[in-house]
């Protein structure tokens, strides 16, 4: 897919460029980002260059992941990264997982929720996603708060699902369906009957 740009009231979500390497490198020096995401630690400038120069463009070209640089509209400041990963866009699956990180100084301002809502709506309306998933290591309260404010419903805890630094960790898991946002999907949903 050709990379696209999304806009919200305060944000521009655009493809990463090689010019973003410095801002990505600086943001990922915050120990909370590699602690709760798959970002390498220590995070070198070469990691940032590889992310913006190869991983992101390859993801768009190969339809394996769609990563956006989330920036402020008023100054172009990097707010974070937001993307759809684990893409399964063909029938019958039509699902994706939402992932994100936010620059430390810009957390708690609602930017990540605003960006997440735009990406999920794009996934549902333009990509035909019928199930959006979210997962985070149990204990990542910030990511969980963003997911809940975006509309995700928590489905539970998967025990020992994630291996991090040689230890199996539990993860929280949630989903969002088009119907949760008042949208329709091509495949009807047959929920479990209420007792």
Image (spheres, rainbow, N blue to C red):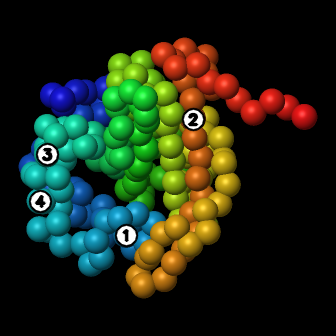
SS for tag 3? helix
Q: Residue drawn at (39%, 73%), measured in percent from left and top?
A: 31
Say the numbered circle drawn on residue 156: none
Q: Examine the rendered structure and indicate whether residue 62 appears above or below residue 138.
A: above
Rounded to the nearest whole Å, what is the CA distance between mark 1 and mark 2? 25 Å
Say the numbered circle drawn on residue 34: 1
Which is more N-terminal, label 2 or label 1? 1
Query: Residue beneath label 3, please?
Result: 58
Query: Residue beneath label 2, please?
Result: 176
Rounded to the nearest whole Å, what is the CA distance between mark 4 and mark 1? 16 Å
SS for tag 2? strand
Callout 4 touching callout 2 (CB < 8 Å): no
Query: Residue beneath label 4, please?
Result: 49
SS for tag 1? helix
Q: Which image quarter holds the N terminus? A: top left
Q: Residue drawn at (40%, 54%), measured in percent from left and top?
A: 101
For this view, does 57 lie left or right of residue 111?
left
């Amino acid at each position: 897919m050709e990379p696209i740009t999304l806009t919200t009231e305060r944000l521009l979500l655009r493809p990463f460029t090689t010019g973003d390497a410095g801002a990505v490198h600086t943001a990922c020096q915050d120990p909370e980002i590699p602690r709760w995401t798959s970002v390498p630690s220590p995070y070198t400038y070469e990691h940032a260059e590889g992310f913006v120069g190869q991983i992101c463009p390859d993801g768009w070209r190969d339809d394996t992941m769609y990563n956006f640089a989330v920036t402020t509209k008023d100054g172009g400041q990097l707010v974070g990264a937001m993307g759809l990963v684990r893409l399964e866009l063909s029938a019958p699956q039509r699902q994706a997982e939402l992932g994100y990180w936010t620059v430390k100084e810009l957390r708690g301002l609602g930017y990540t929720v605003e960006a997440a809502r735009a990406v999920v709506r794009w996934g549902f309306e333009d990509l035909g996603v019928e199930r959006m998933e979210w997962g985070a290591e149990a204990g990542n309260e910030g990511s969980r708060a963003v997911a809940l404010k975006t509309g995700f419903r928590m489905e539970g805890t998967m025990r020992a699902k994630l291996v991090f630094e040689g230890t199996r960790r539990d993860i929280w898991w949630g989903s969002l369906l088009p119907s949760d946002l008042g949208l329709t999907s091509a495949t009807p949903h047959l929920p479990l009957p209420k007792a």
